[in-house]
């Protein structure tokens, strides 16, 4: 058995593992990344690529806003195939009750210095003429962006490698702990192991509760200009919060290519990767209720992926209390593309004794014990 020694071994080369490797290597640590498949081939390849500030809770806001700004700062360095576009989000309100939520969200963002503008139905129709008539307005959040996740992960990994990180592909990790990572005939020693295995994190550490939440996406052929912003119905938030039933919501995103990504669905207890025609039909019907012309467009691919969900809907970023050589960077659910960069920074801050820019306590895995006590 061959053995190599590093300061940090990151298990998983999704966008989160790649972001962690880059930040750790950038701070002078000797880093290896071990991945059984290819870079960005897990949930990252299935993701929509919406870089979005969210306001469900203060910690969620803090991490999404921090990360959104990190993406904006990094964007001049991103190659064109990452397709970073600062197109903004419009949260679409279908009725006056949802307009109330628009105003609440705008006030929340204003208090925290995030640019956001309440728009009426006329402005909404002008900005997005393919939405159905009669929608009452929305909230425009101009600093949100979109990108193409698999290329973003590849780019972050290349940046990490340029800073000295080593990438080991085709190695399936079977066991981690006490500073050791075992993968077939290979063994790695490290001061710190980062479990960035996404929705598979609990296969390596069964005590870490990460639930798989399935999602479907559809991509169309090229229709430049059909959609200009990332468009999300306000009901999306209800769909995200549903912890028991399957849910769908109108959520579309433009790509620079002119293609349109159409989502989204959320399902628990749906392990198989197959496309579920019933939920897909529900999802597309919902999308057409908001954007009737979508039904005329040609869809070229449909796929699924699994988000790694935690009980309190916040990721785990930090040391595992039962083995101080293990750090977690997983559980990002539907926001891991957005929050990958912030995760890398917060993890590197902890490992280098640097004061983090946002409070880290809400993301520490130590809260898992408390969750079990109160469950
Ligand atoms: C349909 C859908 C839409 C989404 N849309 C968005 C969005 O618009 N915006 C957003 O911010 N987020 C979105 N997400 C969420 C986002 O895709 C994920 O949160 C993010 O990709 C998680 O990245 P990760 O690196 O943690 O996991 P992954 O990308 O799954 O990477 C984990 C890696 O670990 C590897 N691995 C696992 N076990 C082992 C092992 N034993 N040995 C070696 N390697 C191992 C896997 O092969 C994989 O490459 C979406 C997700 C889905 C499913």
Image (spheres, helix red, strand yellow):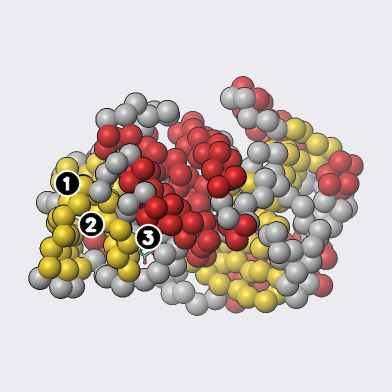
Q: Quarter holding the N terminus?
A: bottom left
Give the residue at x 67% y 45%.
Answer: 86
How far apart, in angstroms, are the residues tagged by discs 3 and 1?
Answer: 19 Å
How far apart, in angstroms, are the residues tagged by discs 1 and 2?
Answer: 18 Å
Dot 1 falls on a residue whose secondary structure is: strand
Q: Residues within 10 Å of mark 1 (few under 14, many from 20)?
A: some
Residue 31: x %, y % from top left: 27, 51
30 is higher (above) or lower (below) than 41: above
Dot 3 falls on a residue whose secondary structure is: loop
State the residue position of label 3.
13
Label 3 C-beta lies within 8 Å of the nearest ligand 1 atom: yes
Q: Who comes first in sequence, dot 1 or dot 2?
A: 1
Label pair 3/1, CB-CB below 8 angstroms? no
Residue 363: x %, y % from top left: 36, 38
Q: How many marks?
A: 3
Camera-side mark, 1 or 2: 1
The answer to whether residue 286 shows anywhere in this view is no
Q: Quadrant of residue 364?
A: top left
Residue 168: x %, y % from top left: 30, 65
The answer to whether residue 174 shows anywhere in this view is yes
Give the residue at x 37% y 60%.
Answer: 13
State the residue position of label 2.
205
How far apart, in angstroms, are the residues tagged by discs 2 and 3?
Answer: 17 Å
Q: Residues within 10 Å of mark 2 (few under 14, many from 20)?
A: some
Give the residue at x 77% y 33%.
Answer: 118
Residue positioned most to the top: 111
363 is higher (above) or lower (below) than 183: above
State the residue position of label 1.
191
Q: Who comes first in sequence, dot 2 or dot 3?
A: 3
Relative horizontal placement of residue 272, taking residue 134 as reference (left or right):
left
């Amino acid at each position: 058995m061959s053995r190599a020694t590093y300061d940090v071994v990151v298990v998983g080369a999704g966008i989160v593992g790649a972001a962690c490797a880059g930040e750790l290597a950038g701070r002078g640590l000797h880093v290896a990344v071990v991945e059984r498949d290819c870079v960005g081939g897990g949930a990252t390849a299935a993701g929509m690529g919406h870089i979005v500030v969210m306001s469900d809770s203060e910690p969620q806001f803090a991490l999404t806003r921090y990360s959104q700004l990190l993406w904006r700062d990094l964007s001049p360095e991103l190659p064109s195939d990452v397709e970073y576009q600062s197109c903004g989000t419009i949260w679409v309100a279908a009725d006056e009750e949802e307009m109330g939520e628009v105003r609440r969200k705008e006030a929340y963002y204003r208090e925290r210095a995030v640019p956001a503008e309440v728009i009426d139905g006329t402005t909404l129709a002008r900005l997005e003429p393919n939405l159905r008539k009669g929608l009452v307005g929305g909230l425009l959040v101009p600093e949100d962006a979109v990108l193409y996740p698999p290329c973003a992960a590849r780019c972050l990994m290349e940046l990490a490698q340029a800073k000295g990180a080593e990438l080991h592909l085709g190695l399936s990790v079977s066991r981690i702990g006490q500073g050791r990572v075992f993968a077939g005939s290979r063994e790695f020693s490290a001061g710190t192991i980062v479990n960035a295995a996404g929705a598979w994190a609990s296969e390596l550490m069964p005590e870490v509760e990460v639930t798989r939440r399935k999602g479907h996406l559809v991509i169309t052929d090229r229709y430049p200009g059909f959609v200009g912003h990332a468009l999300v119905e306000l009901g999306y938030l209800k769909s995200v919060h549903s912890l028991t039933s399957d849910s769908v919501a109108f959520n579309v995103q433009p790509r620079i290519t002119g293609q349109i990504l159409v989502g989204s669905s959320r399902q628990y207890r749906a392990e198989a990767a197959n496309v579920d025609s019933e939920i897909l039909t529900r999802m597309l019907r919902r999308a057409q209720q908001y954007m009737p012309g979508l039904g005329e467009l040609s869809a070229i691919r449909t796929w699924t992926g699994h988000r790694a969900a935690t009980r309190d809907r916040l990721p785990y970023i930090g040391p595992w209390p039962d083995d101080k050589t293990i750090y977690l960077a997983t559980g990002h659910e539907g926001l891991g593309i957005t929050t990958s960069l912030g995760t890398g920074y917060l993890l590197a801050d902890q490992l280098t004794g640097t004061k983090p820019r946002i409070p880290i306590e809400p993301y520490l895995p130590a809260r898992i014990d408390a969750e079990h006590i109160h469950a």
